[in-house]
Image (cartoon, rainbow, N blue to C red):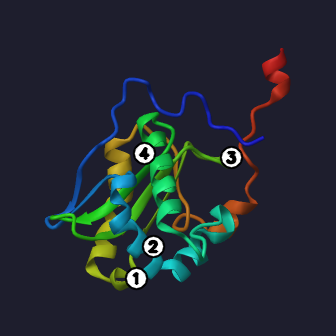
Amino acid sequence: MTTTPTSWLPASWAHPTRVPVTQAHHLRPMGPADVDLDLPAVHASRERLWSIYGQAWGWPPVDLSREADIDDLAHHAAEIDAHESFLYGLFDAAETALLGCVYVDPPAKVGADADISWWVVEHAVGSELERALDAFVPAWIEAEWPLHQPRYVGRDLSWQQWLCLPDLVEDDAEEDA
């Protein structure tokens, strides 16, 4: 059984709510109200996103509907509120477009205290914005997050390598002792 460590983040720690990435772009937590920006971004980048996250997460499905995306975003918002997992959207200054996402998750596999990944929309691949996000995320995690051994999946190791790692499992024998 894969489990989330009970002490993943300190109870007193407050997650960032708006984070400048460039002068014209910022990150903020996402929720169901973002569906009208999220759904077109995911649909437009679906094939590439599936090549990244498909085997590990089964996401995004070919037939992702507005209702399913609202449900997914509501689930993410609840996890953010509970400090269980974090989904940040990369937005332009006026928040007229979602340009990518950053995921900060508790580790599902041994060897790290967080699994972190991110992506940009298709038209931003190879752009200055993507390079800025690639440089920003590890520096932000180091400076602002109470993590000691973050793992950048898709960067430090491939998703295939990540899938081959042993699952993080609670030892039921220890719980019974």
77 relative to 36, above or below: above
Q: For numbered disc 1, what is the local secondary structure?
A: helix
Q: Which residue is mark 4?
A: 77
Dot 4 amino acid type? Ala
* C-alpha span from label 3 to label 2: 29 Å
Q: For numbered disc 3, what is the local secondary structure?
A: loop
Lower sequence index among marks 3 and 1: 3
Q: Which residue is mark 2?
A: 42
Q: For numbered disc 4, what is the local secondary structure?
A: helix
- Residue located 68% across and 49% down the image: 109
- The answer to whether marks 1 and 2 mark residues whose Cβ atoms lie closer than 8 Å is no
The C terminus appears in which quarter of the rendering?
top right
Lower sequence index among marks 3 and 4: 4
Rendering coords of residue 127 (x, y %): 30, 82
Dot 1 amino acid type? Glu
Q: Which is nearer the eye, 80 or 71?
A: 71
Q: Which residue is mark 3?
A: 110
Rendering coords of residue 39 (x, y %): 42, 70
Q: Which residue is mark 1?
A: 122
* C-alpha span from label 1 to label 4: 24 Å
